[in-house]
Amino acid sequence: MSPLPKTWVHVPIEEIAEVNPRKNVELSGDDLVSFVPMAAVDEVSGTIAAPIDRPYHEVSRGFTHFRDEDVILAKITPSMENGKSAVAGNLTNGTGLGSTEFHVLRTNGTIKPRYLWYYIRQKTFRVSAQTVMSGAVGQQRVPADWLKNHRIPIPPLAEQQRIVGKVDRLTERTARACEDLDRIPSLIARYKSAILSMAFNGDLTKDYRKKNDTLKGNGIDSPPDWVIKPLGEISDIQGGIQVGKKRPSDAVLVEVPYLRVANVQRGWLDLDEIKTIRVTPQERDRLLLQEGDILMNEGGDRDKLGRGWVWHEEVRNCIHQNHVFRIRLNDEAFPPEFISHYANENGQQYFIDQGKQTTNLASISKRKVSALPIPVPPIDEAVEIVRRIEVTFAWLDRVATEHAAAKRLVPKLNAAILEKAFRGELVPQDPNDEPASDLLERTKAELAAARKEKQARKTRLSTTAGEIKMNAKNLQEALSEAGDWISAQDAFQRCGIGPSASTEEVEALYAELRRLDKDGKLETEAVNDEQGRKLHDRLRLKAA
C-alpha cells in the first residue's frame, strides 16, 4: 500500500466512530419514527428507499436504533456482500429503527458520514469483511469487533469534504453513462427490427432495383417484382422424431444427435448441449438435416412458435425432434436466410395468432405453417437483401459486444475512483488544512471534556437527590411546616422528590396529594402572569 499524505492518519474505526451506539432517544410512545427493513436499503444508490412511519412504542424493542447522519451497513450474508449500506437521512423525528442485521456507525466529528460510507462501499472492504464472517451457513455475520478494529485512512476534515464532492460528481457521471449504456440494447433491437421491416417491404433494396433498372435502360425506380406465396408452395415441410417412441424389440437402432426446441433460437442455433436418440436407420435417413435446411419450432411456449434459423451442418448426422419443423426450399438458389428472417420478424404475430394453446404447451400445425404467406422477390434481389441484413447485423453485433465491454468497465471505473480517493490521489492537499492527527487529538479532548462534564452533572444531581432524601417528609408534614402557601415544586422537593426519584416514589406522593384533597385538608391556587397565563400551582393546608 502506498504511503498516505503527511496530513492523513490511519486509525481503527472505533477511534472515529461509535460502533452500534446505545439507544438514546427522547420520544413518547406515540411519536412517529422511520422503520427501515433490510429491503428498504438500496445497495446501488446507498439510500433508504420508502421507509415506513411507525409509532415508536410499536418498534422500540427488538430493532436496531439509529438517527440522522448515522451510517448503517448490513452485517449478514448476502446483503453485506451485495453492498447494502446507507447514510441515514430525513428520518421522521430524526430517528430510525430497522433490521437487527444492521451495524450502525456514528461518527464523532473527525469524519464525514458520507466519506465513511464511500469507504465501506468499496469492494475491497466487503471482501475483507467476508473473510471474517462467522455463524451458520447462510446466516454468517461480520463481527462488531472486527469493524471496530478495521483501520481506515483519515484525511483533514476539509479534504474529506473535497473528496466526497469529487466522488459524488464522478459517480454521477458514471451513473449517467450506465443509463445511456442501458438504452443501447433496446436501440440495437429496434434498429434490427427496422432493417428487417425495410427488407421485406422492398425499401432496403430500392437503390439496388433502381441501379438494375438503369442498366436495363428504362431509368425508373420500378416497384418490387415480388409475389406472395404460401410457405408450403415453395418448400417441403417435415416433422421430426417423437422422443420416447416405442419400436419392436428386434428393431435395429442407431444412435444419432437430434435438435430440440431449446436448440432452435430466434435467429441463431444454441448447440452447447446436443442430446442423442436411438432411431432406426430408415428414420435417420428420412430426418437427416442438410445444408440450408430451415429449422422452425412447432411447440413450446407460445412466444417460441415459429422461431428458428438455418442449418449449416454444424453437427454431423443430425436429425430433429417432432417439436421442430424442417423446411427445405424447392429452389436451392433461393437464400434460406431470407425465409427465416421473415418468419422470425414478420411471421411472429402470425404464429401467435394461429397457434393452439393447451394447459402446458402451445403448438402450431404443419398446415398452418404451410399457409404462412411469404413475399418472394427475384432470387438476385433476395440474395442482396440477405447480404445487406447480415452486414448490418454484424455491425450491430460488434456494437453490442463493445457495449457489453463498456458495461463491465463502469464498476471497475467506480472502484478505481474510490481507490484513488482513499490513497489521497483524487484531490490536491491544502497545506492550510488542519492535519488529521491534530483533528483527532482535538476531538478526543472535546469528547473527554464532554464525558467529564456529564459525569460531574450526574454527581451533582445525585448529591442534590441525597440531600433531599435526608430531609424528606410526607406532604402533610411539608405543608404544615411551611405554614402558608408553597409552590408545588418546593413541596415536592421537601418530600424528597428530585430528578432521581423513582416512579414508585412519585406515585406515592400523588396518592397522598389526592387523599388530602379528598379529605378536604388541601387548598390549591394557580399563580398566573400579567397576561393571565398559568405559571405554576401553589399549595397549603386548610386551617383546622
Image (tube, rainbow, N blue to C red):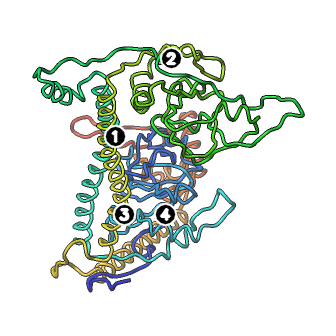
Spatial CA distance of label 2 from label 1 is 25 Å
Spatial CA distance of label 3 from label 4 is 34 Å
Q: Secondary structure at mark 2?
A: helix
Check whether the beta carbons of the residues at disc 3 and disc 4 lie within 8 A of each other: no
Judged left or right of residue 363, residue 395 is: left
Q: Nearer the viewer, residue 493 or 119?
A: 119
Question: Which residue type does callout 2 highlight?
Answer: Gly
- Measuring 51% from the left and 71% from the top, which residue is drawn there? 128
Spatial CA distance of label 3 from label 1 is 34 Å
Nearer-N-terminus badge (2/1): 2
Q: Which marked residue is nearer to the observer: mark 1 or mark 4?
A: 1
Nearer-N-terminus badge (3/4): 4
- Which residue bears the numbered disc 2? 232
Which numbered dot is residue 21? 4
- Which residue bears the numbered disc 1? 390
- Which residue bears the numbered disc 3? 412
Q: Which marked residue is nearer to the observer: mark 2 or mark 3?
A: 2
Q: Position of residue 355 (x, y in %)?
A: 55, 16
Q: Nearer the viewer, residue 439 or 8?
A: 8
